[in-house]
Image (cartoon, helix red, strand yellow):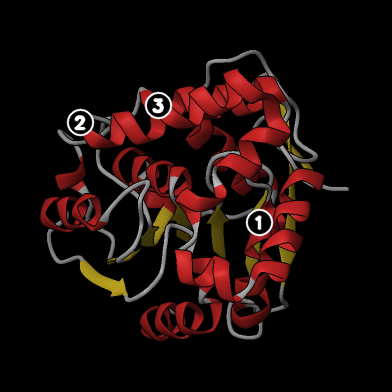
């Protein structure tokens, strides 16, 4: 199995697709392993090679002591790219993965060809400090399994949960089967809570797509609008009727929009 060594942690990664052009590196959010990108990989990989990986503390990657930082996890991403022989890539991140992608675009701009920030944010303050702080309370109060269950109403729209309850329970089972360790989850949550790129986001030069669900309760539309205002020339797409995990709630529409945007840059 392929691993990249990043300082004190081995980071598990996978490569999908046989194309010869620069790949798309997909960075997942808090407590999520790389397999949550599979609805996108299946749509993208016939046109662009894809790299997915388990973040530090999640899935098949090593857990190191908390807290983690976005800068540290951006270093993990670069270690994966180095191990895979990737000089520059298209980069897409969801939630915490978006924060990591933005850090790369600011601090390693030669490695980022295009940037996609999905359900993400610019800095942890005000409401985002409150909503992300709830994640820590869920973990500390109830443990890892409880965390994944308690966060569902924050991640999906009410209509999706009501209309797709059996599927929702399968998603929950998948989350818990591919979960972070408690220490790893705490480390990633701390990375959320210490995050602030508000003074640096204006340095991004890569073409940037920002997307968000209009029913995102964790990082609401206003967070994405703030990103859009900070990154000159960026594009903003709001998915109607979707919560935080648009990638899972409406993967077909999400895949169409993002692939249509990416295609001219391939």
266 and 56: which is toward the camera: 56
Is 106 rendered above or below residue 40? above
100 and 215: which is toward the camera: 215
Q: Dot 1 lies on which element?
A: strand
Q: Residue at x 22, y 29 (%)?
A: 125
Q: Which label is found at residue 133? A: 3
* Residue 111 appears left or right of 151: left
Q: Give the alpha-carbon distance from disc 2 to disc 3, as whole Å.
A: 11 Å
* Residue 110 appears left or right of 182: left
Q: Which residue lies under the disc numbered 1?
A: 52
Tell us which disc is closer to us: 3 or 1.
Answer: 3
Is 14 rendered above or below residue 198? below
Q: Is residue 27 visible?
A: yes
Q: Dot 3 lies on which element?
A: helix
Sequence-wise, the earlier of marks 2 and 3 is 2
* Residue 201 appears left or right of 101: left
Q: Give the alpha-carbon distance from disc 3 to disc 1, as whole Å.
A: 27 Å
Asked whether the beta carbons under mark 2 and mark 3 sit within 8 Å of each other, the answer is no
Percent position of residue 235, x then y = 22, 70
Q: Which residue lies under the disc numbered 2?
A: 126
Q: Give the alpha-carbon distance from disc 2 to disc 1, as whole Å.
A: 32 Å
């Amino acid at each position: 199995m392929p691993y990249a060594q990043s300082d004190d942690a081995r980071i598990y990664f996978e490569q999908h697709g046989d194309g010869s052009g620069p790949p798309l590196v997909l960075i997942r959010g808090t407590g999520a392993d790389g397999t949550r990108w599979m609805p996108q990989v299946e749509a993208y990989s016939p046109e662009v090679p894809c790299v997915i990986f388990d973040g530090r503390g999640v899935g098949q990657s090593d857990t190191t002591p908390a807290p983690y930082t976005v800068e540290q996890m951006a270093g993990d991403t670069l270690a994966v790219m180095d191990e895979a022989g990737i000089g520059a890539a298209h980069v897409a991140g969801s939630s915490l993965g978006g924060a990591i992608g933005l850090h790369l675009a600011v601090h390693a701009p030669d490695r980022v060809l295009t940037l996609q920030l999905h359900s993400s944010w610019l800095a942890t303050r005000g409401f985002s400090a409150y909503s992300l702080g709830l994640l820590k309370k869920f973990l500390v109060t109830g443990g890892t399994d409880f965390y994944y269950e308690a966060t569902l109403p924050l991640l999906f729209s009410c209509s999706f949960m009501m209309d797709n309850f059996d599927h929702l329970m399968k998603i929950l089972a998948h989350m818990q089967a591919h979960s972070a360790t408690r220490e790893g989850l705490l480390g990633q949550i701390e990375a959320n809570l210490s995050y602030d790129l508000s003074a640096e986001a204006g340095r991004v030069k890569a073409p940037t797509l920002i997307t968000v669900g209009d029913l995102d309760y964790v990082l609401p539309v206003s967070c994405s609008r703030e990103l859009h205002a900070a990154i000159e020339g960026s594009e903003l797409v709001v998915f109607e009727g979707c919560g935080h995990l648009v990638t899972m709630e409406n993967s077909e529409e999400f895949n169409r929009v993002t692939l249509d945007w990416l295609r001219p840059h391939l």
